[in-house]
Amino acid sequence: MSRQKGFTLVELLVVIAIIALLMSILMPALARVRNQAKAILCLSNLKQMGSAFAMYLDDNDCKFMRGYILDTPPDAHKRYWMEALRPYYGNEGDARLCPVATKMGRSRGGVVTGGEYNTLGGKGSAWGYFSGEPCGSTTNPWPYVVACDYGSYSINGWLQDPEEGKAMWISPQKDYNWRHCNLKGTANIPLLGDGKWIDCWPDFTDEDPAYDGQPWSQVPSQMARICMDRHGGYVNWVFCDYAARPVGLKELWKLKWNKFFELDADPPLWEPWMKRYKDYD
């Protein structure tokens, strides 16, 4: 009777080596596909939020939210986009979150006003959960938010309609704000997109971060809140025409963030990490 031949140790080692080689080739490709899928889902979320903005503006005479001012009125939480849009996006928290941004912040100095937004950086940074009980209540120390909200999108802070005479956090001499949606060039006015905090106030004089992932509180630049390599050289944004698309990192300086944003101004000198990305004339 013939004996059935089995695998030798050498043959098994060769098979294992081949499998390991194939895995080393396939894993980066699978990672790219996974990241691309997350980027597409991120764009889908922003399109949903763009639709929510469209419905809100249609119900409010085309006027943007009152937004952030230096005093704290009793209805402060209703003035910000997360609460104001809630009836239109169904209070689905993940609609405010890019799937790439999974790094949530915690308390700061023992008082939770949001996330560790002054220490977090990088493409995976979200603005964290707001504390308070019960969820949905105004028990957070900062009156502009409600308990348990989380996300990773940032609104263009220049899209707000504060009362006349009310001081904004940034108080320019000119009225930089887009107060209503009857605008020209809406396809180039950013509305909401990838960010490390709930808002941003970019201007053409802003510098780029010193490195990818630099915490935005370390940079006297509002662009630092949104300039990060979240999607392979891009961030996702929805615009005031309610179209969502990827935006190149250097392209951030070519968007009309406010009324007086100079699109023809010289860009920053670009930090070393930024120089490899696409230029926009």
Image (cartoon, rainbow, N blue to C red):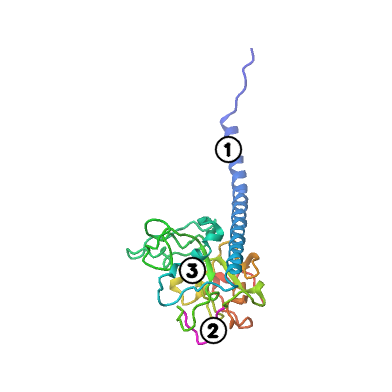
Q: Can you say whether 103 is above or below 179 in the image?
A: above
Viewer-nearest of discs 1 and 2: 2
Residue most extreme to the bottom: 173
For the N terminus, which image quadrant? top right
Q: Which residue is mark 2?
A: 175
Q: Which residue is mark 3?
A: 80
| Most common SS among magenta residues | loop
Q: Quadrant of residue 267?
A: bottom right
The crowding category of the residue bearing disc 3, from other C-alpha atoms within 10 Å (few below 14, some 14 to 19, many at least 20), is many
Q: Do callouts 3 and 2 mark residues in contact (Cβ within 8 Å)?
A: no
Q: Do callouts 3 and 1 mark residues in contact (Cβ within 8 Å)?
A: no
Residue 263 x %, y %? 63, 81
Q: Which residue is mark 1?
A: 16
Q: CA distance from mark 3 to mark 2?
A: 19 Å
Q: Quadrant of residue 52?
A: bottom right
* Amino acid type indicated by mark 1: Ile
The crowding category of the residue bearing disc 1, from other C-alpha atoms within 10 Å (few below 14, some 14 to 19, many at least 20), is few
Q: CA distance from mark 1 to mark 2?
A: 67 Å
Label 2: which secondary element? loop
The crowding category of the residue bearing disc 2, from other C-alpha atoms within 10 Å (few below 14, some 14 to 19, many at least 20), is few
11 falls in the magenta region: no
Q: Is residue 142 left or right of residue 250?
A: left
171 falls in the magenta region: yes
* Amino acid type indicated by mark 2: Asp
Label 1: which secondary element? helix
Residue most extreme to the left: 110
Q: Quadrant of residue 140?
A: bottom left
Q: Is residue 233 visible?
A: no
Residue most extreme to the top: 1
